[in-house]
Image: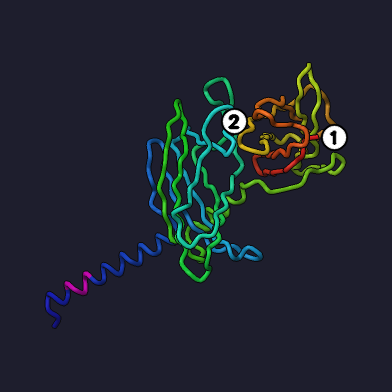
């Protein structure tokens, strides 16, 4: 018959083993939530990528917001602050690529519009380890803003041990990655059909001001949002607006325009490489296009 002391030692050892196992499993799937007023953030992990990208580990930064609250895209629009991600304290990490799910437009409360996410967002991450045979510890210092009736700054300090195994967050990450706009080339107008595509871009003079005209194809009657970014974050281009003043054929084509405002001092519009992101409820595409 075992003594009470032996039973106590075994119980403590068993409890430690259980806690250690729980911590390890938790570390592979998600960090704890770092909570702020009106928001909470955490890191989640998936398995390794496949095919030619098998050296990459999949992860994501998840932010949950109070109902009706919003946070921002990389280009916040007329007002707002884009999030920043600092991965400097990670271990065995060569690089981290942050992906941006398709955003939405919303009123900023000051007569303009901002660009971002309502209620919930996951920024997928592609992590390349320095040494694929060693453990990879991902650490991020996240700074972001959340807005309801007012806007408040938020931050999170998150860490997670990654593995190459698929965990409980795999499906969640796959869904977030599916909302990242697919990269595509500029289509010629006669090559645009019923799939989402940016077909053309050009400048024109309208009432003494230069404006940019962009034509986008999508299935008929599908709602479309278009966002335009300059070559650097210093460019603050206006939000493109749908132009219903001129008929466009075929009917699958939609025309958007914006004035050439918000250029940094000394910048030239001619030849500038713009990033155009077209978004529908079920699809999104990102196109690099040179402005003639």
The quadrant of the rendering that contains the N terminus is bottom left
Asked if residue 11 is among those painted magenta in the image, a careful observer would answer yes
Q: Where is residue 214 in the image (x, y as percent from the top left)?
A: 77, 33
Residue in the picture at 41% in, 51% down? 158
Asked where in the image residue 30 lies, by quadrant, the reply is: bottom left
Residue at 82% over, 33% down:
251
Determine the residue located farthest toward the top in the rendered image. 207
Q: Which residue is drawn at 59% across and 48% down?
A: 99
Residue on which disc 2 sits? 77
| Residue 55 falls in image quadrant | bottom right
In-image side of 178 versus 109 (left or right): right
- Mark 2–mark 1 Cα distance, whole angstroms, equals 30 Å
Q: Is residue 129 magenta?
A: no
Q: Position of residue 223 (x, y in %)?
A: 69, 34
Relative to the observer, which residue lies in front, 169 or 152? Answer: 152
* Residue 156 badge: none
Q: Give neighbour class at mark 1: few <14, some 14-19, many 20+ (Cα, 10 Å).
A: some
Residue behind mark 1: 250
Q: Which of marks 2 and 1 is in front?
A: 2
Instruction: Give the image location of residue 34, x and y in percent.
Output: 38, 46
The region drawn magenta spans 8-12
Question: Secondary structure under badge 2?
Answer: strand
Foreground pick, 133 / 171: 133
**Lower position in the chain sequence, tag 2 or tag 1:** 2
């Amino acid at each position: 018959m075992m003594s009470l002391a032996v039973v106590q030692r075994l119980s403590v050892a068993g409890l430690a083993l259980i806690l250690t196992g729980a911590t390890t499993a938790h570390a592979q799937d998600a960090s704890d939530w770092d909570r702020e007023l009106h928001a909470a953030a955490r890191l989640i992990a998936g398995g390794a990528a496949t095919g030619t990208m098998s050296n990459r580990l999949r992860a994501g930064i998840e932010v949950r917001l109070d109902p009706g609250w919003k946070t921002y895209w990389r280009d916040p629009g007329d007002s707002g602050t884009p999030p920043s991600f600092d991965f400097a304290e990670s271990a065995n990490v060569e690089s981290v690529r942050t992906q941006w799910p398709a955003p939405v437009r919303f009123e900023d409360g000051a007569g303009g519009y901002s660009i971002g996410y309502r209620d919930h967002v996951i920024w997928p991450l592609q992590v390349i380890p320095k040494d694929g045979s060693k453990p990879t510890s991902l650490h991020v210092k996240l700074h972001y803003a959340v807005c309801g009736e007012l806007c408040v700054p938020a931050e999170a300090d998150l860490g997670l041990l990654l593995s190459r195994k698929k965990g409980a967050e795999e499906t969640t990450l796959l869904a977030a990655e599916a909302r990242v706009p697919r990269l595509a080339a500029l289509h010629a107008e006669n090559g645009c059909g019923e799939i989402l595509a940016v077909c053309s871009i050009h400048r024109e003079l309208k009432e003494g001001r230069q404006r940019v005209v962009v034509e986008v194809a999508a299935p008929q009657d599908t709602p479309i949002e278009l966002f335009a970014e300059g070559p650097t974050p210093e460019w603050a281009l206006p939000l493109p607006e749908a132009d219903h003043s001129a008929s466009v054929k075929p009917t699958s084509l939609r025309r958007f325009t914006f004035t050439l405002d918000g250029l940094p001092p000394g910048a030239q519009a001619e030849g500038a490489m713009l990033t155009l992101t077209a978004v529908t409820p079920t699809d999104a595409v990102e196109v690099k296009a040179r402005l003639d």
